Image (cartoon, rainbow, N blue to C red):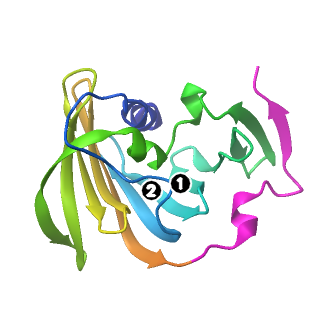
Amino acid sequence: MRLFAFFVVLVLLGVAAAAVTLPGSSGPSYSAVYMIGGPGPAEGGRVYHGDGKERLELFSLRGLRVYIRRPDLGQVFIINPHNRTGKALPIDHSRADFGFWRLEELPAEAQGQEIMDGETVTKYVAIDRYNKPQGYWLTGDGIPLQVVRTAGIETVTIRLIDLQRGSQPAHLFEVPDDITIEAAQ
């Protein structure tokens, strides 16, 4: 249920607000630890972002799951390392929406600046299609240090910590050779 709520809040990026358009996948390369807080047990993992690609390693009660988003291939790979299998989904598939990359499509209004983990961030608020406010705290170079999303009656906070800017190894965005990928049906 918790993982479902995580995906629901990340899918709700079709909003109507005004003012600015948030930066997204064109931002800098980085890696960070992320934590998901909200109802249910806490989850988290590590996120890697580079050259418009993204890798999310999600540790949850179900174990490790790896998501690799490849806009250049038009696909998202969902990998289960424990059984060496995975699926390839079209990038616009609802189950493929796991990250922050759609921020560039999100009109929002700046609410001021604050310091978060030693970084100056600007808080943006957008109203989604369900008329719920969504909060985004972005660094000056467009990295989302915190996202607070509301889906239904649940509020979920996604927070990046231990932010490391810099290029990421290319192999992180490739499906390992020992993983069997099946196409989505």
Q: Residue at x 10, y 59 (%)?
A: 112
Q: Relative to residue 5, is residue 111 drawn left or right?
A: left
Give, as a three-letter code, the residue at label 2: Gly
The answer to which of marks 1 and 2 sits earlier in the sequence is: 2
Residue wearing tag 1 = 59
- Tag 1 near tag 2, CB within 8 Å: yes
Percent x, y of residue 132: 19, 28
Foreground of the two, 42 or 161: 161
Say which element carries label 1. strand
Under mark 1, the amino acid is Phe
Residue 183: say if magenta.
Answer: yes
Calculate the distance from the C-alpha at mark 1 to the C-alpha at mark 2.
6 Å
| Label 2 element class | strand
Name the residue nearer the viewer: 161 or 144.
144
Give the residue number, with chain letter if any, for mark 2. Answer: 44
Magenta-highlighted residues: 167-185
Q: Is residue 133 left or right of residue 36?
A: left
Q: Position of residue 103 (x, y in %)?
A: 39, 46
Residue in the picture at 59% in, 35% down: 96
> Circle 2: is it few (<14), some (14-19), or many (20+) Cα within 10 Å?
some
